[in-house]
Amino acid sequence: MIYVVVYFKELSLAVDLVKEASKITEWFRTKNVSSFVKKDDSPVTLADIASQIFIISNIKKYFPEDQIIAEEESSVFV
């Protein structure tokens, strides 16, 4: 339980970001946006990319010193 107290700011931000990211993915879902295949043959959608960009940009805004590892590589965005 001590982690909740120590990382309360991080946890609070994470919950807020996930709530907002779910709105982004829901918007894309209602538009029937198709997916495409990455170099590793796995699917990715614009909703995946948009929600990841949203989450990462906000983490960097509030915790600029933190390093982030995410599912989609930057090469996917090119």
Image (cartoon, rainbow, N blue to C red):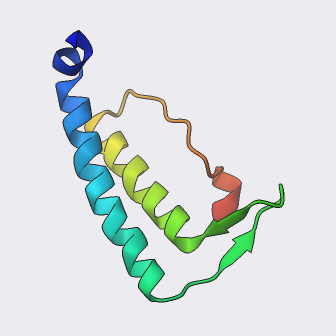
Residue in the foreground of this view, choosing between 47 and 62: 47
Point 48% across, 30% down: residue:
67
Question: Where's residue 43, x and y in %?
Answer: 71, 65
Point 83% across, 61% down: residue:
41
Q: Is residue 30 above or below residue 18?
A: below
Residue in the foreground of this view, choosing between 63 and 28: 28
Tell me the quarter of the image containing the C terminus.
bottom right
Point 38% across, 79% down: residue:
27
Q: In the image, is 58 to the left or to the right of 74?
A: left
Task: State the residue lying farthest toward the front.
Answer: 1
Question: Where's residue 37, x and y in %?
Answer: 77, 69
Query: How many numbered badges does the structure rendering display?
Result: 0
Residue in the foreground of this view, choosing between 78 and 45: 45
Residue in the foreground of this view, choosing between 12 and 54: 12
Point 63% across, 82% down: residue:
34
Task: State the residue lying farthest toward the top.
Answer: 2
Task: State the residue lying farthest toward the bottom.
Answer: 31
Tell me the quarter of the image containing the N terminus.
top left
Rendered image quadrant of residue 26: bottom left
Q: In the image, is 12 to the left or to the right of 41?
A: left
Q: Is residue 32 above or below residue 1?
A: below
Q: Is residue 14 above or below residue 5?
A: below
Question: Where's residue 21, x and y in %?
Answer: 35, 61
